[in-house]
Amino acid sequence: MTITAAADGSALGNPGPAGWAWYIDADRWAAGGWPHGTNNMGELKAVLELFRATAGVDDDLLVLCDSQYVINSVVKWMPGWKRKGWRKADGAPVMNVELMQHIDAALQGRRYRFEWVKGHVGHELNEAADERARGAATAYQRGSAVPEGPGFTPLTASVESRPVAAVPSRSRRVTLDLSDDEWSALERRARAADVSPEALLRSLATGGR
């Protein structure tokens, strides 16, 4: 299974009060920030905290970013920086090197890929992450509490709030391949009905009985 998440950062004034956020769905997201930072710092911190939050699961991770800087840093430039002692080709030190080093450590042993998405064009996950990163930056600007979010809980750890009728002993096993968008839609409908995705599918198969 693949976890699809958006990671984004925000800085009011750039530099200025800064925030970061990652977002999977309404029940799994997190945000934070600093009194003073840059947009790039927020973007990198969001990626770092996403990998840290999901470190305990064996799922693949698809990270959606609207920052080419973050994607290129992780996918293209980081191996060369490491070989050069975390210096760029011209010998200058790498910017935000501590965040880069922490990300490098968090990536070890993980299955992941990054995908660029255009920001501020209505992409659901990207907009949700952007809104929360901006909210964290605004909270630091105002000196108010930062909305930190619920964090990450694996779906396999969820427990239904009411018992589900036992499956008859004579049953059929069905394997269904769903896209990430289809799985997200199924999750939303299941949460609205207060059941698991599996229970929702069974109810559809029995006509809602």
Image (cartoon, rainbow, N blue to C red):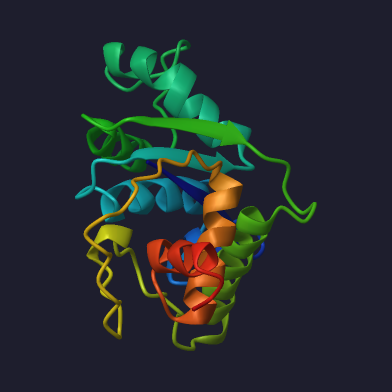
Along the line of sight, which residue is nearer the eye, 206 or 17?
206
| Residue farthest to the bottom, as pictured | 144
Q: Quadrant of the N terminus?
A: top left
- Position of residue 20 relative to residue 1, above or below, is below
Along the line of sight, which residue is nearer the eye, 172 or 69?
172
| Residue farthest to the right, as pictured | 121
- Position of residue 135 relative to residue 105, above or below, is below
Q: Residue 141 location, x and y as percent? A: 56, 78
- Position of residue 190 relative to residue 113, above or below, is below
For residue 130, say whether it is visible: yes
Horizontal side of 42 relative to 82 (left or right) equals: right
Q: Residue 194 location, x and y as percent? A: 44, 81
Q: Which residue shows up at 40% across the image and 68% down it?
A: 199
Horizontal side of 111 relative to 115 (left or right) equals: left
Q: Quadrant of residue 132?
A: bottom right
Along the line of sight, which residue is nearer the eye, 135 or 125?
125
Horizontal side of 48 relative to 181 (left or right) equals: left
For residue 18, say whether it is visible: no
Q: Which residue shows up at 34% across the image and 68% down it?
A: 151
Q: Quadrant of residue 68?
A: top right
Q: Which residue shows up at 23% across the image and 47% down it?
A: 57
Along the line of sight, which residue is nearer the eye, 97 or 111?
111
Q: Residue 108 location, x and y as percent? A: 22, 30
| Residue farthest to the front, as pictured | 170
Q: Residue 183 location, x and y as percent? A: 52, 52
Q: Which residue shows up at 77% across the image and 56% down it?
A: 122
